[in-house]
Structures are given as C-alpha cells and as structure tokens.
Image (cartoon, rainbow, N blue to C red):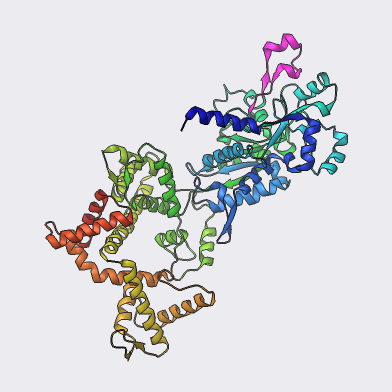
C-alpha cells in the first residue's frame, strides 16, 4: 500500500463530506430532510439502531456493541430501549444524566468510548450529518437563528422542533456583521471529533483546589479586555469549556461522583432546562447527552447525602454488572490478548475457558429458590440445557438477585495474571493449568481480599480445575475414537430404535440376520446407567425422549444427536467407557511400543488438526490425561 497515496485519498474523502452555505440554503435541506435537525439523543439512538438489531430469546441484541462488549446484552437492551429510545422520542428522560454504575473493569469506560467513536463515524454518513453555524464556538444548530416569535410557524412548515437560543458570540455577529439578516448567516457541515473538540467533551476530576470551573464552562480571555472593554463582551470570552464543546453530541463525566460539588451544580440547569451559566452572560443553551460513570461504593455514599437529592433526581442510573456467561468471558480475554504484542504465543484450547469458569463462579450467587449449585447455574446462564429446569426457571434466577454480577473477580485481574504467565517464562504455549496456577499465585499477593474471600476463591479454582479435567479427558477420548461423530450417531440411532420398539411393545429388525427380535435391553441400560437413570426410572426416561421426538416432528424440526443434552452425554460416556482402558494404557505408558507410539501420534495429529492444539500442548494434554486416568 502506498501510504501517502492512501492519506491523500482519505483527505479527499473528508473534503467531499464538507458543505458550506447560508441559513436559507440549509432550511431547504431541512425541508427535504427534517431529520437533519435531530437532537443529540436522537442522533445517538439512530447511530445504534443503524447497525441493526436481532431478537435473541425474546431480547433485543444491538449489533453496535458486538466485538467490543461481551455478555451484557440485557443491560445494553435496557440502555437503548429505556434511555436512548425514550429520549429520542423527546420523553422526559432526555433531561436526565445517564449514570453508568458498576464494579471496576466492568465495561463502563469501553461503553462510553464506543458511543464517542460511534458518533464520530456516524457524523460522516448522510443520516448522521451535523450542520452548524459557521464560526460558532459551540457548533450550535443553525435553526437557533430563527426568532422565537416565528418558531411555531417554521416548526409546522418544516416538521421539526427548535429548542435553544443563540449563544452570545453568534448574537453579537448577527447584530454587527449581518445586521439581523439571518438568511445570509453562513452554515457548514462539521464532523464530530473528540480530537478536534467538536461535539464531544470529556471532564476528568482532579484536585478540587487546582481544578477550575472554567474547565466546564469556559473562561474570560483577559488579554482581550483592553481591546473590547468589558468582561461581558462575548469576544472577550473563551467558549472552550467541555460543556461548550460537547454541544450537539455527548459529554463524558469520568468518575463523576469524585467531582467537587461546585462542578456538579452546573448540571442541575443543564439537564432539566437544557442550559447552563457561564461568565457574565445569560443562560446558554446546550443540546448534549451527558454520560457519567462511577462505582457502587461511591454511588451509595452519594445517595446517602441529602444535599445531593436534586442531582440524584436528575439521573438515570444503569447498573453495569460483570458478564455472567463463560463463553462471553472467554471472548474478553481473547480480545485483550489479541491486542497485545504477545498474541504470537499459542493459547491452548480451554485455557481461557478455564479462567472464565473461575471468574464467573466468583460472581454468581447460589439460587435459594431452585436449589441449583453454582456450576449448573453457570452452565445454564451460558445457554446449556440442564435437565429438570426450563427457560422460566432461568429468568427467575436472573431476576432473583438484582446485585448479581456486581461483585467477584474482575477481568482486569485475570488478564493481568494471564499476562504474568505469558511473560514470566519463555513459553511457546500457555495451557489451562498454567493459567490457574498464575491466578492462584496472584491471590496470595492480592492486597484487597479477605481470608474468607481467598479461601472461597481457592475453592473456585479447584472447581474450575475439575471442570477442566473433564474437558481434557473428553478431548483425548474423542480423539481416540475414529470418526467419533459417526460412531456416536450410530449408537444414538440404535438406542432410539430400541426405545421406540420398547415403548410401543414392538420388535426391531436385526441388521445382520434380518429377523425381528426384542429390543436390546442390555444396550439401552448400558447407555442409561451412564447418567444415573435407575431401573425404576428407565420407562419414564424412554417415554420422555419419545415425547420430545414427537414434539420436534410437529414443529418440523429434526431430532438429532445434539437435541437431548442428557442422552448425548450418556452416549458419549458409553463410548468413552468402552475406550477408557485403551486410552489409559496408551497415554500413561512411559516406554510405548511401536503400536502404542503410532496411536499416540495419530491422536496428537487429530488434536492438532481438528481441535486447535499445537504439538507442545497436545503432548502435554496426553500426559496430563494419562495421569488423571491412573489416579
């Protein structure tokens, strides 16, 4: 790629997006496209909606947040539907501060950054184009030039709403430069940019003794006082505060509740009335989405102070908990490692999953209503079907604890420990045991956890290790089975034929002799016993499977190997049991003979080709599983 040629093309693309004209020309544009005059909240909602939405299990999943934020579909749905959509329809929530409240490293800052970057991209599209009064330090809406008395007529004619007054700077220009001729006032299209301070402002608290309110509302330019003669002359004022520059877009308050009270007072009028006080001017209008974030401890302290009631009533608080799905937590770690310079190191299959298992277990609360242990609950949250529980039970569990996910191990801690394991020694490959070992070592050095929490976390490391042991054994045993899927399906179909004949008091056809024979009770029981189906319960279990097959048939769906979780588990365990001795002998032999060595090489090849292992972690897995089977 010719870098400088690409830069020139990029600059040319930006220039094509620009537009200059007069208010008269802009009004013609609005007549054809009324959405040009949309509010900041409407712009954010349309930006999110433009990326698309899909319905997953009765919930809306917005594609805007894909590949960046994982496992927070429900909070994000609430954010878009209850806040942005309502605000875009001009309901009263647009007059509220959006406060994201949650634990550290929960995704609050990432969410705000996505909104900012999204606005920058959206302003480059025709649907998200932003037109402003040329030369206005606050990039305000050109329709503010319309006199208040005429606005009802103009609104009706153009099909828009006009809110807000001209800033002092533009009022002076209109009077001195254009002698009140608003139709000639220049208008331009701008691109929202945090770097160029157009439509995005960010305020970060610091020492209250050194931080000035001017950071928010602008300040007097004392070097021009002698030239213009008065501090109330707009030309002697710098409209460069974060609230000024965030107009038409969004304002981020980082760690808002750490701010000194005087900085928050400006928000009272801005949120409710859409204006704020600056310098020796009348109230200045501002159309901006205010997003703040804080942690739960500071929020509890804030609402306990009665002095904060006025500001509290002007907030929409959205809890942002930790992700509670193992598969989504894996994606978080994979993303963070992929962004580093260590992405060349191979991560063994299940290594990140094992870390995710540990993390999610620390965040869950045991269900009192359903008596479900944390491991089953974790699996159900991750979309697995747990026998005896339905979707309604899942929803009840998700609503049982409002604070679930607000505590536990944060992703930042886990990724720090994974990073430590990657750096500590010259590794070619990182496996699950390396990760768990690093997490355990980190707990010994963790300054903020109590002894009780440490013991609890160590127990979760043991649980995650057991889960990995099962995954490892299944992985190796699958690799030992030639054409495992075909073997499993054959056994599965054979079992279905037998239980159908059993329940219907019929016979089945022997595949070799062709004669009709009784159902193979020994085969059926050898599979059912793998998952603890008793002799007394076998009839009910078999009938339940036939009912499930019938239900699938009525819905036009095919009942296959993956349709019944417990039956699939039983078939796999049956195959594994038949192979266990072969696997045990082959993997644990220190001096394998030629036949065993050939089998080991074949299994390693299958692990490498079909399961994502490298030669190093494939051999480590075989040795580890051999030691497990010998215990």
Q: Quadrant of residue 567?
A: bottom left
Q: Is residue 480 above or below residue 5?
A: below
**Residue at 50% in and 27% down:** 4
183 or 473: which is nearer to us? 183
622 or 378: which is nearer to us? 622
> 602 left or right of 449?
left
Residue 451 falls within the magenta-colored stretch: no
Residue 238 falls within the magenta-colored stretch: yes
Spot occupied by residue 509 in the image (x, y as percentages of width and height) = 34, 87
Spot occupied by residue 458 in the image (x, y as percentages of width and height) = 33, 50
Quadrant that contains the C terminus: bottom left
Spot occupied by residue 493 in the image (x, y as percentages of width and height) = 37, 77
Residue 449 in view: no
Q: Is residue 481 above or below residue 444?
A: below
Q: Quadrant of residue 529?
A: bottom left
Residue 367 in view: yes
User: In the image as oriented, which residue stretches furthest toward the top?
Assistant: 226
Write the start and end of the magenta stretch as one range: 218-242
Spot occupied by residue 347 in the image (x, y as percentages of width and height) = 33, 47
């Amino acid at each position: 790629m010719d870098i400088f040629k690409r830069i020139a093309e990029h600059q040319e693309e930006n220039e094509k997006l620009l537009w200059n004209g007069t208010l008269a020309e802009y009004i013609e544009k609005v007549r054809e496209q009324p959405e040009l005059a949309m509010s900041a909240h409407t712009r954010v909602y349309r930006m999110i909606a433009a990326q698309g939405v899909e319905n997953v299990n009765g919930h809306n999943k917005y594609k805007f947040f894909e590949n960046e934020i994982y496992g927070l579909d429900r909070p994000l749905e609430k954010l878009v539907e209850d806040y942005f959509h309502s605000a875009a329809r001009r309901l009263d929530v647009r007059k509220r501060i959006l406060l994201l409240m949650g634990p550290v490293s929960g995704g609050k800052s990432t969410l705000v950054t996505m909104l900012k970057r999204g606005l920058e991209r959206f302003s480059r599209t025709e649907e998200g184009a932003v037109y402003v009064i040329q030369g206005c330090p606050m990039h305000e809406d050109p329709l503010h030039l319309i006199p208040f008395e005429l606005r009802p007529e103009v609104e009706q004619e153009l099909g828009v709403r006009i809110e807000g007054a001209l800033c002092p700077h533009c009022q002076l220009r209109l009077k001195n430069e254009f002698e009140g001729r608003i139709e000639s006032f220049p208008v331009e299209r701008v691109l929202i940019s945090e770097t160029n301070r157009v439509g995005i402002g960010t305020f970060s608290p610091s020492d209250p003794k050194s931080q000035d309110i001017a950071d928010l509302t602008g300040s007097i330019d004392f070097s021009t006082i002698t030239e213009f003669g008065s501090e109330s002359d707009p030309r002697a004022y710098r409209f460069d505060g974060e609230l000024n520059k965030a107009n038409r877009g969004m304002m981020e308050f980082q760690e808002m509740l750490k701010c000194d009270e005087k900085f928050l007072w400006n928000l009272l009028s801005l949120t409710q009335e859409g204006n704020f006080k600056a310098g020796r001017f009348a109230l200045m209008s501002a159309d901006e989405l205010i997003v703040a974030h804080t942690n739960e401890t500071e929020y509890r302290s804030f609402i306990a102070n009665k002095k904060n009631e006025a500001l509290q009533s002007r907030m929409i608080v959205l809890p942002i908990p930790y992700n509670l799905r193992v598969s989504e937590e894996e994606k978080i770690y994979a993303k963070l490692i992929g962004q580093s310079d260590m992405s060349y190191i191979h991560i063994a299959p299940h290594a990140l999953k094992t870390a995710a298992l540990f993390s999610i277990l620390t965040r869950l609360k045991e269900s009192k209503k359903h008596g479900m242990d944390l491991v089953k609950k974790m699996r159900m949250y991750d979309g697995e079907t747990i026998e005896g529980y339905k979707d309604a039970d899942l929803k009840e569990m998700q609503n049982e604890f409002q604070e679930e996910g607000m505590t536990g191990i944060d992703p930042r801690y886990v990724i720090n420990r994974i990073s430590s394991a990657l750096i500590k020694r010259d590794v070619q490959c990182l496996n699950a045991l390396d990760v768990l070992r690093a997490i355990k070592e980190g707990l010994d050095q963790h300054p903020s956890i109590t002894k009780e929490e440490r013991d609890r976390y160590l127990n979760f490391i043991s649980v995650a290790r057991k889960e990995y042991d099962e995954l490892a054994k299944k992985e190796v045993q699958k690799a030992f089975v030639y054409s495992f899927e075909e073997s499993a399906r054959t056994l599965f179909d054979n079992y279905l034929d037998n239980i159908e004949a059993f329940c219907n008091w019929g016979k089945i056809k022997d595949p070799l002799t062709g004669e009709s024979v009784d159902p193979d009770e020994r085969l059926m029981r050898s599979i059912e016993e793998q998952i603890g189906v008793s002799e007394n319960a076998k009839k009910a279990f078999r009938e339940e499977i036939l009912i499930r097959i019938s239900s699938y048939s009525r819905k036009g769906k095919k009942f296959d190997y993956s349709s019944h979780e417990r039956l699939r588990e039983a078939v796999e365990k049956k195959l594994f049991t038949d192979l266990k001795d072969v696997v045990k002998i082959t993997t644990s032999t220190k001096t394998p003979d030629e036949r065993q060595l050939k089998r080991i090489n074949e299994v390693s090849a299958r692990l490498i080709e079909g399961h994502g292992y490298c030669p190093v972690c494939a051999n480590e897995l075989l040795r580890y599983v051999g030691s497990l089977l010998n215990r």
